[in-house]
């Protein structure tokens, strides 16, 4: 097969981790007789520096024309202290999600047996955790009307959802639950919010189309607790944009393997794969960033975007092997053990595929 | 001194835990020569059953006339499955907060040395944790305009804040920080929300009035992570209503002492003290609920509402003693050890004051 992949390395350590994911993807392609055509494009702070906007039209066209997008990270410290600066890297991220129609963010949290002791949670709390959040990504308070009134003394943000938006996200949730343990948790704040009541009634109405799926409804504050107490009691969770932002990040640290967690954003026009860690500016250019989350994001891309399960499994297997053999960057290296460079980890993966 | 306290036992285990807090408070009053006049009033599901509304006017008048309010918990399973029922216990809670002007919810999270192993977190992560959230409680998306459009197909909720609302909450945060380690963290989502940008600019402008306080600004998703990773890196945190709902609950479970956490809500007209656990309907009437969070809420009341620090310390000391000696309800009883009844714990506290 032949694929066109848009390559959005972004800022900070983005280019370094993307580089390793490209090496591994090319090696897999070669092994399984595929051909990948990578098209790099600018986004984030580097795009602002180059052309004045964080998500240039040219980048958008490259993404739209591609079979999938592989994304690094965006963000630069020079924008950190002024969240009201007129042009910011995050705006590029939101615009990209919206224009590409990436309405579902798929965020797995799972554990690697060899890394379980890195978790802040006790082993018996975290063992066996394997959950997936589907976060709505192009609606809610992120994209509703916002602004000031009363000479700037009053600010407002509007959270809006339509039944159709909830339905298309929930449909993905039900379908995903059917491929797993058939348990779906709808996370909302229906005791307070009207949008949550719309979510709940929409999901409730869909239950009869999926009679095998057991659906539970939990309030967002209760989920924030149970994620820390019994993360392995969850399987597939669906939720709106802002709750998803908070809960997926909370979930990502409980596994102790945050530096390894991949993600996908899927929707109308294409799909995008990215590590969940950020641009980690302090590490830029040092060749120390952990490339495994990006490599595992590429594995998700092979499986979900191209339907190539065997290729994805081959990537996951070699990543597991690298973890077991301690071929890891300094964030994961055990005391006294050697820490490998970003590029050395990539080289090892390629050599051991 | 002489105090009038409104007593809102509420639903579920509310009456049982309130009963023990009253016993302990009366014993303290006797010991220190105070006189307490308790006035019971209805709220929650029991108020709906009795008079059709969850926060009756009569209850409101009793609260307004009192020097403080001691509150149990509200909620009943018969309202759980239908968050859009026209009358619900939670509405009483929100109405009460609004009408009493309780704009700041004070939520400490701390550890008891004897209970540290109950935490889902590893000991080295949780040891020394002693943080306080100030959650804005009468504004934001809880109280903004909400409703449906397009024949019910679109739902919306509006989050609104005025500079004055942010200021009065932040002022309490700065003042609290001055009595502690002079560290204040403002939690927002200023990279996305206009209300968060108003929060941030308001707090930034107040910094110069409190030159000794070191203020940090963190995004809500980052705080959701760091609370699990390094809870003891926080001291005083201020945040808006919905973020506070999620993060204070998350924080409450990390200590492993959720059943012991007290809280206060303070503001314009009076102040209210309540355990953070809910109405725990399954345990109603069984005399097994842990009364210590309510007893510690009474201690907060003595200290903060009445300025009686010695009385508060006496309550805290006897609670510590009961924990050390294992005079605890079944939720805290160690394997093989005897579990005491709710009322037995209260009796022991009174006898050992
Ligand atoms: C950078 C920010 C706008 C973004 C979000 O809130 O969606 C990030 O936190 C994320 O989760 O991808
Ligand atoms: C019951 C609910 C409306 C309430 C809230 O969200 O404020 C509760 O979760 C709380 O935190 O006191």
Image: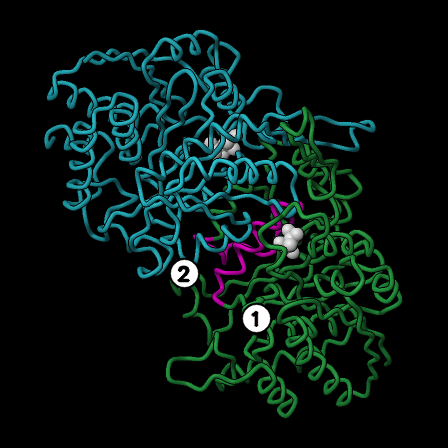
Chain colours: A cyan, B green
Residue, x 85% and y 69% (percent of image)?
B66
Out of A79 and A160, give the one closest to the viewer: A160
> Percent x, y for residue A150?
83, 29
Report how far apart the C-alphas of labels 1 and 2 lie in the structure: 17 Å
Q: Measured from the top left, where is residue A157 in percent x and y?
A: 67, 31
From which residue to which does the magenta span run? Answer: B228-256
Q: Which mark is residue B121?
A: 2
Q: Residues within 10 Å of mark 2 (few under 14, many from 20)?
A: many
Image-based side of B331 in relation to B238, left or right: left
Position of residue B268 relative to residue A251, above or below, is below
Give the percent coordinates (x, y) of residue B272: 75, 64
- In the displayed structure, does residue A297 sit left or right of residue B80? left
Q: From the viewer's side, name the closer residue of A353 and A286.
A: A353
- Is disc 1 placed on a helix, strand or loop? helix
> Which tag, 1 or 2, sits closer to the chain's start?
2
Q: Chain of mark 1?
A: B
- Count of numbered circles on the image: 2
From the image, tell me which residue sits under label 1: B260
The quarter of the picture where residue B61 lies is: bottom right
Chain for numbered disc 2? B
> Could you tell whether A276 is left or right of B294 in the image?
left
Q: Is residue B332 above or below residue A287?
A: below
Image quadrant where one finds the C terminus of chain A:
top left
Q: Residue at x 58, y 51 (%)?
A: B81
- Type of secondary structure dominating the magenta stretch: helix
Label 2 element class: loop
- At which x and y percent is residue B348? 60, 89
């Amino acid at each position: 097969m032949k694929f066109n992949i848009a390559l959005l390395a972004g800022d900070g350590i983005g280019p370094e981790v993307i580089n390793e994911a490209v090496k591994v993807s090319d090696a897999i392609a070669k092994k399984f007789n595929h051909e990948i055509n990578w098209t790099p494009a600018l986004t984030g702070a580097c795009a602002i520096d180059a052309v004045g906007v964080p998500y240039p039209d040219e980048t958008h066209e490259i993404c739209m024309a591609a079979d999938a997008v592989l994304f690094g990270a965006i963000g630069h410290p020079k924008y950190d202290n002024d969240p009201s600066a007129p042009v910011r890297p995050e705006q590029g991220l939101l615009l990209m999600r919206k224009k590409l129609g990436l309405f579902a963010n798929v965020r797995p949290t799972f554990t690697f047996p060899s890394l379980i002791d890195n978790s802040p949670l006790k082993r018996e709390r975290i063992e066996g955790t394997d959950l997936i959040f589907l976060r709505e990504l192009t609606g809610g308070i992120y994209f509703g009307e916002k602004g000031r009134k009363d000479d700037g003394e009053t600010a407002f943000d509007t959270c809006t959802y339509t039944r159709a938006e909830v339905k298309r996200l929930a449909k993905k949730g039900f379908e995903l639950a059917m491929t797993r343990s058939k348990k779906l948790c709808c996370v909302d704040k229906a005791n307070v919010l009207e949008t949550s009541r719309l979510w709940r009634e929409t999901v409730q109405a869909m239950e009869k189309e999926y009679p095998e799926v057991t659906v539970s409804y939990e309030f967002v504050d209760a989920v924030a607790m149970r994620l820390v107490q019994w993360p392995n009691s969850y399987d597939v969770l669906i939720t709106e944009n802002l709750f998803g932002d908070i809960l997926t990040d909370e979930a990502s640290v409980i596994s102790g393997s945050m530096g390894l967690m991949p993600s996908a954003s899927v929707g109308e026009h294409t799909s995008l794969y990215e590590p969940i860690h950020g641009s980690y500016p302090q590490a830029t250019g040092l060749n120390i960033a952990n490339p495994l989350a990006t490599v595992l994001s590429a594995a998700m891309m092979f499986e979900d975007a191209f339907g190539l399960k065997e290729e994805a499994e081959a990537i996951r297997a070699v990543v597991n092997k690298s973890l077991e053999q301690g071929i890891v960057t300094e964030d994961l290296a055990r005391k006294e053990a050697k820490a490998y460079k970003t590029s050395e980890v990539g080289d090892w993966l390629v050599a051991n595929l």
